Amino acid sequence: MQIMPVTLNGRIVKLVPLDRSHLAGLTEAGSDPGIWKYMRYGVIDSQEKMLGLIEYLLKQQARGTDLPFTVIEKSSGKAIGMTRYMDIQPENRAVEIGGTWYGTAYQRTGVNTECKFLLLQHAFDVLGCIRVQIKTDLRNERSQKAIERIGAVREGVLRDHMILPDGTVRSSVYYSILAREWPEVRQRIIALMDKPR
C-alpha cells in the first residue's frame, strides 16, 4: 500500500494535495475561532499560525505518516477547509481519516459527507485498505453523529487520551469501517449525497 499525493474529485468539492499556495484561502476559511474548539492545534487565528499548521502537516507527509488535503469548493475554486489521511500503516493496510475542519458556511452542508466518501472510496477501492478509522473528541456530539450517520462502527473511548493546547484533557471516541463493510457503507453514503438539501 503506497499512499501518494492525489486529487480526489467529487460533485461539489475536490480534495487536492495541501500546498503553501493555499495559505490565504485557508486562513480566511478558518477565521471563526469556533472551528478549532475540539482540534488538537489550538486556535488558528492568524496567517502565521495557519502557515505553521501547513508546514507541520507537510513535514508529517514527508515522514509518511500523513497525507493532507485542501478541500476546494468546485463552484468557486475557494479553499474551504482541510482533511487528511493520518496514522498511515501500510503494513496493516490501515489509515485514519481526521484533522478535518471546514469554514463555518460549509458546515452542515453536503461537504463533509462528500469528503468522507471520496477518502473512503480511495482508501478501500484504490489503496486496498482493510480498515479505516475515525476519531473525535468525546465532547463533540455533532461530530459523533456525523460519523455514525455514514455507517462507521463505534469501537470505544480512549479516556484522557491527549492534552489539548488550552490544557483540556481530551477523551477520544474511536470509530472504524472495515473493507467487508464498505459496500454497504458506500451505498448508504451515496443515498445521503443524493438526498435533496
Image (spheres, rainbow, N blue to C red):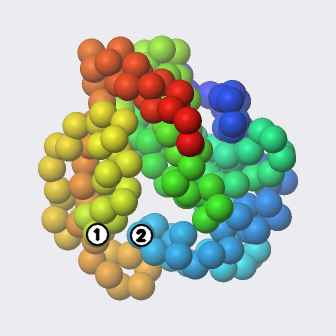
- Seen at 84% across and 53% down, the residue is 21
Residue 139: give its label: 1
Mark 2 lies on a secondary structure that is loop
| Crowd tier of the residue under label 1, counting other residues whose Cα lies within 10 Å: few below 14, some 14–19, many 20 or above | few
Q: Earlier in the sequence, mark 1 or mark 2?
A: 2
- Seen at 67% across and 46% down, the residue is 71
Left or right relative to 119: residue 180: left
Q: Judge by depth and name the residue closer to the eye, 159 or 194.
A: 194
Quick check: marks 1 and 2 in contact, CB under 8 Å? yes
- The residue pinned by badge 2 equals 38
- Which quadrant of the figure has residue 157? bottom left
Left or right relative to 105: residue 88: left
- Which quadrant of the figure has residue 90? top left
The furthest residue to the front: 196
Q: Judge by depth and name the residue closer to the eye, 130 or 36.
A: 36
Quadrant into which the C terminus falls: top right
What is the CA distance from the residue labelled 1 to the residue labelled 2? 8 Å
| Image coords of residue 183 (percent x, y) | 35, 15
- Which quadrant of the figure has residue 115? top right
The image shows residue 14, relative to residue 174, as above or below, that is above
The amino acid marked with disc number 1 is: Arg
| Crowd tier of the residue under label 2, counting other residues whose Cα lies within 10 Å: few below 14, some 14–19, many 20 or above | some
